[in-house]
């Protein structure tokens, strides 16, 4: 269940950050809401997008580290240090 929730948060932050911005800053400013409702709605949307970006960045770093490790192992396979000329 955590994996689905994590995927959902990342998906929301990657795909809905601009619509959240337009809703949070344009629609909430134009409509007649109480100031506390505006601030709370905007804050919740910013937290969701920020948390999703953070999770996405952690995944990117993990993928980059795995790729670097895989490339180093490939180089070790092609470069045999035991060979003597």
Image: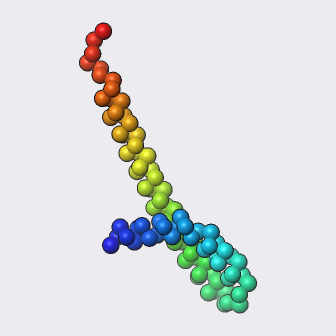
Quadrant where the image shows the C terminus:
top left
What's the residue at 51%, 70% (across, down)?
12
| Residue 20: x %, y % from top left | 60, 74
Q: Residue furthest left?
A: 82
Q: Nearer the viewer, residue 43 or 18?
A: 18
Instruction: Quadrant for residue 84, please give it.
Output: top left
Q: Nearer the viewer, residue 68 or 47?
A: 68
Q: Is residue 75 left or right of residue 19?
A: left
| Residue 81: x %, y % from top left | 29, 20
Q: Is residue 48 left or right of residue 20?
A: left
| Residue 53: x %, y % from top left | 51, 62
Q: Is residue 27 above or below residue 82?
A: below
| Residue 50 in sight | no
Q: Is residue 66 above or below residue 5?
A: above
Q: Residue furthest right?
A: 30
Q: Is residue 32 above or below residue 29?
A: below
Q: Is residue 45 above or below residue 36?
A: above
Q: Nearer the viewer, residue 15 or 38?
A: 15
Quadrant where the image shows the N terminus:
bottom left
């Amino acid at each position: 269940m955590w994996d689905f929730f994590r995927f959902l948060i990342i998906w929301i932050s990657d795909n809905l950050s601009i619509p959240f911005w337009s809703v949070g800053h344009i629609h909430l400013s134009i409509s007649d809401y109480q100031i506390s409702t505006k601030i709370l709605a905007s804050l919740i949307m910013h937290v969701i997008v920020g948390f999703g970006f953070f999770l996405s960045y952690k995944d990117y770093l993990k993928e980059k580290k795995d790729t670097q490790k895989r490339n180093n192992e490939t180089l070790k396979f092609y470069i045999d240090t035991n060979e003597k000329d």
